[in-house]
Image: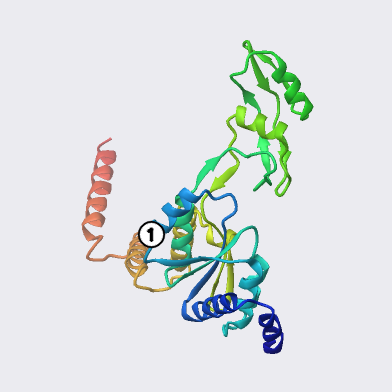
Amino acid sequence: MAEKIKKAEHHVPEFKVKLVNDLAKLMDSYNIIGIVNMENLPAKQLRNMRAQLRGKVVLLMSKKRLIRLAIEKSKKQNIKELEKHIKGMPALLFTNDNPFALFKLLKKNKSTAPIKAGQKAPREITVHAGATNFAPGPIIGELGSLKIKAGIENGKVAIKEDKVVAKEGDLVDAKLAGLLTRLAIEPMEIGLNLVAVFENGEILTSEVLDIDEDAFMASIMQAASEAFNLAIFAAIPLKDTINALLSKAHAEAKAVAKEANIMTSENIAEKLAQADAEMAAIKAAAKL
């Protein structure tokens, strides 16, 4: 492997060799190494993101080939797996912060934008059924040319059913881009797209990092509730269950004593009251 890198470096200008070495050193110095796709990111937003991330991360753009050479040079085990996630206009991100918190920060600062002719669909694009603000006219033909079923409802054009107009990775032509813009559908996300990170020998993709915190907390609460109920059912004495178990045992003991007519300090008053009531009932019945 080292021989392969040396051969590659032989054909690389000196400043690029230095960049590869610097990137490799950064990879070995930081706990988290991320691959970012900066495709379609306006320069102004990039400057804003750099300002927000200053002091938290190091962000460096480079060519795919140089990033691959730096990965080859890194001493970290399994980091070569990161190569599979280099896409678009890549940049390397270095940090020691929590990768989930970092992904959340980057996602929070993304904004939507219309797709332009010639751009690739970032995800599946669907035109949903429902009313539009368009008056009847050529728009119906435009929708029909894209196999989108439409009709007239209350004097306005209405889309009759959902229609997938582009799949992830499809090139969007001018006709579709214009229609999506007119329908106020903005499928593009502008921001730093964190594709994957390398941490402790493992690759965490964006799908793993993108956590729904509300759903996550709900699942934890449900798991805790189910664990508590199981511990109570199995009578397992724990710090969290002992009070409930003692209350349950006390209630069950009282029920057994009552059913078996066992006199205790707790039920004696109740028993005497019951006996007194029964005696009064017998007296009343005898008088009859």
Which residue in the protein does label 1 denote?
Answer: 259
Apparent side of residue 47 relative to residue 254 in the rendered image (left or right): right
Determine if residue 114 is in view.
yes
- Quadrant housing residue 281: top left
Residue at point 64% right, 65% down?
86
Q: Residue 247: x percent and y percent?
A: 32, 63
Q: Residue 222: x percent and y percent?
A: 47, 57
Give the quarter of the figure containing the N terminus. Answer: bottom right
Q: Residue 142: x percent and y percent?
A: 74, 24
Q: Secondary structure at mark 1?
A: helix
Apparent side of residue 240 relative to residue 98 in the rendered image (left or right): left
Residue at point 43% right, 58% down?
50
Give the quarter of the figure containing the C terminus. Answer: top left
Task: Reply above or below: 157 against 274.
Answer: above
Residue at point 34% right, 72% down?
239
Label 1 crowd bin: few (<14), some (14–19), many (20+), radius 10 Å: few
Residue nearer the viewer, 26 or 142: 26
Q: Residue 10: x percent and y percent?
A: 68, 83
Residue nearer the viewer, 191 or 62: 62
Residue at point 78% right, 26% down?
145
Give the residue type that dot 1 points to. Glu
Determine if residue 128 is in view.
no
Task: Reply above or below: 194 against 238.
Answer: above
* Picture colour scheme: rainbow
